[in-house]
Image (cartoon, rainbow, N blue to C red):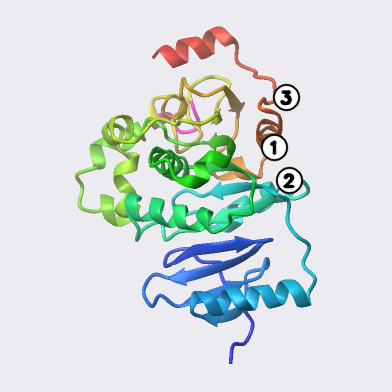
Amino acid sequence: MNFPFFTCGGLFWWVDRYSYAGWRIQECIWTKRCRLLDPYRVRRAAGKFNDCYQALMRFVNDWEIPRPPKKAVVFLHGLYQGTGAFEKMTRRFAADYETMVFAYPMLRFDIGRTVAALNDFLSRRSDIEQLNFVATGIGGMILRCAFAGNPEWAAKTGRSVFIAVGSRGYGQLKKYQKKKWFPWVFGKMAKLLVPEYALTQVPKMSKEFAVIMAGREDGKGVCQWLGCDNDGLLCVADARDKKAKADFLAMNRLNPFLLTDNQICSLTYSFVKNGQFGTGKRIRTEQLMTDLWDN
């Protein structure tokens, strides 16, 4: 017998296998046992995947859960971020899109295993007509690698937004990559953070996308020791991608708070829906932005 109880939503040893109307079926990477979570992260059933799926269908019928929209936005988190990091942003999209936050064991899976899990997760929702993506941190790198395999679901891709994604790696970590503690702290996908690997081994983004970064008005950055304009963790220059359809430099924002910033939530929604950032206005001049890109 299964008793409902609150969970943390899965962070280090759970991977999402299915999502519908805010409900998720997760699998434990150690025991392969699945569990069904409702939108409030309460466990409603446990057992094999089919058991959890059948339980979900019963809840859908008994609780008369409305059918979600045919268009969806999939959120991909970065290192040490849980599904709750997108809570405010998912509310912004909820009226027009089905929101699906893909959770994966960030320190336990390598890039290949994570991409395979994402492919399986998205392939199970054949009823969705359009897939859009919002990614932060290494979530953006995972998405790029997933597109490179040309999976079936890629044909339904709409638009994507990268928020503080280190597309060029994290330059400040280069000198630490051979330290013994490096893979212990950053897990099996630590190489995605290294500039050499990010620039040469991670495929370029092949779909329509935009980039949002954060920095300071004075161009010196939040952390002076990084030696570049930055949001406290990521240098603006490391987040740039010349193939992006649009980019936006949010001034005086800190990396941990980007996903809860009202302006960034609105800009992300605008690009996914309309293909542009709308009324977003940069403070820094275009000339300074051009100088930054060229460095």
Tags 3 and 2 in contact by the CB under 8 Å rule?
no
Q: Where is mark 3, residue-wise?
A: 278
Image location (x, y in percent) of residue 60: 72, 71
Residue at the location (64% across, 54% down)? Answer: 127
Q: In this view, does 48 lie above or below 235?
A: below
Tags 1 and 3 in contact by the CB under 8 Å rule?
no
Image location (x, y in percent) of residue 142: 42, 44
Residue at the location (64% across, 50% down)? Answer: 128
Q: Where is mark 1, residue-wise?
A: 269
Image location (x, y in percent) of residue 130: 63, 43
Left or right: where does residue 48 sit relative to residue 130? left
Can you name the residue that lies furthest to the bottom here? 1
Would you say the magenta stretch is mainly helix, strand or loop? loop
Left or right: where does residue 62 sit relative to residue 113? right
In the foreground, 178 or 18: 18
Q: Where is mark 2, residue-wise?
A: 92
Q: Magenta stretch: residue 21 in it?
A: no
Q: How far apart are marks 1 and 2 (CA)?
A: 7 Å
Tags 1 and 2 in contact by the CB under 8 Å rule?
yes
Q: Residues in magenta? A: 221-225
Task: Find residue 245 and name its label.
Answer: none
Q: Magenta stretch: residue 223 in it?
A: yes
| Mark 2: secondary structure | helix
| Mark 1: secondary structure | helix
Q: Which amino acid does label 3 sit on?
A: Gly
Left or right: where does residue 90 sit relative to residue 53? right
Image quadrant in which you'd find residue 117: bottom left
Question: How would you rate the neighbour count of disc 3 (Cα within 10 Å): few for under 14, some for 14-19, many for 20 or more?
Answer: few
Q: Which amino acid does label 1 sit on?
A: Tyr
Q: In this view, does 119 lie above or below 239?
A: below
